[in-house]
Image: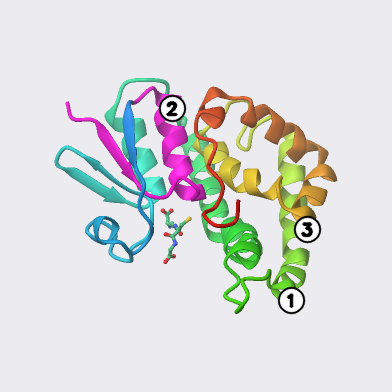
Amino acid sequence: MPTLEIIGAPQSNFVRVTRIACHEKGVPYTLTPARPHTPEVDAIHPFGKIPVMRHGDVSLCESSAICAYIDHAFDGPPLAPRDPVAAARTEQWISLHNTTIDPVLVRKYLLAYFFSGLPDGAPDRALIEATLPAMRQHFAVLDKTLAAHPYLTGDAFTLADAFLLPTMYYMARMPESAEMLKASPNVAAWYDRVSARPSARETEPPPIPGRG
Ligand SMILES: N[C@@H](CCC(=O)N[C@@H](CS)C(=O)NCC(=O)O)C(=O)O
């Protein structure tokens, strides 16, 4: 069987999710670093986003589809529960992360620090400040959810946690979000728990280029 290839920049939270899935499942893979909108990415993703994946004749884009493939095409521990309700709860949290949490915490807040588009590359303070109220709401929702059980959907680590982990990695490193994390004891305990997993340690991203 050919080796699974993940294509994308290791700093990307969505690329990291697919690598975490491989580590958790015990699937060997190679990582081919590539930025969005480069030929190797455009060949698979119709909108040029990372990650994309190749495995023999199979090529896929979109992190949740790639993770589902990794979970179902290989032997190893399930990354999402097979019980229909628990499986749907996992999907629900992946969707909440991808459609609501990531757009605020990563696309707005984090990128306002690193890719502000301002002439001197300075953080976009106006956008950062404007994003803080929504971020506080997100931390409150997560803290309430994680007060009830140690992982997002219950007592076990699932793909839902794998999606949130790389996002929270960056939140732990930026000033306002680190304060919010510290003030959210259940999220902080969850973050310590998931960060200690070998899959998290083995996929820790390098610094964002030029932002050391
Ligand atoms: N829905 C996609 C989102 C992937 C995504 O937004 N990747 C970012 C890097 S973290 C990207 O490629 N951005 C370039 C762009 O949006 O044009 C997935 O889950 O894979």
Tell whether label 1 touches label 2 (CB within 8 Å): no
Q: Which amino acid does label 3 sit on?
A: Arg
Give the amino acid at mark 1.
Answer: Ala
- Left or right: 62 in relation to 177: left
In the displayed structure, 180 sits above or below 118; it is above
* Residue for badge 1: 126
The residue that mark 2 highlights is 23
Q: Which residue is drawn at 55% across and 57% down?
A: 210
For ligand 1, give the image quadrant.
bottom left
Residue at the far right in the pictured view = 183
* Earlier sequence position, callout 2 versus callout 3: 2
Q: Any magenta on residue 103?
A: no
Q: Residue furthest bottom?
A: 119
Q: How crowded is mark 2: few (under 14 residues within 10 Å), some or many (20 or more)?
A: some
Q: From the image, tell me which residue sits under label 3.
A: 136
Q: Quadrant of the N terminus?
A: top left
The tag on residue 4 is none
In the image, taking residue 193 as reference, residue 207 lies left or right, namely left
Up the image or down, 96 lies above or below 56; here it is below
Residues under labels 2 and 1: Cα distance? 39 Å
Q: Give the mark nearest the N terminus, 3 or 1.
A: 1
Hey, what amino acid is under mark 2? Answer: His
Q: What residue range appears in magenta?
A: 1-27
> Is the shortest distance between ligand 1 and the CB of mark 2 under 8 Å?
no
Instruction: In the rendered view, tell whether residue 202 sits above or below residue 85.
Output: above
For residue 125, say whether it is visible.
yes
Determine contact: label 2, label 3, CB under 8 Å: no
Left-right relation of 167 to 128: left
Q: Looking at the image, tell me whether mark 2 or mark 1 is earlier in sequence order.
A: 2
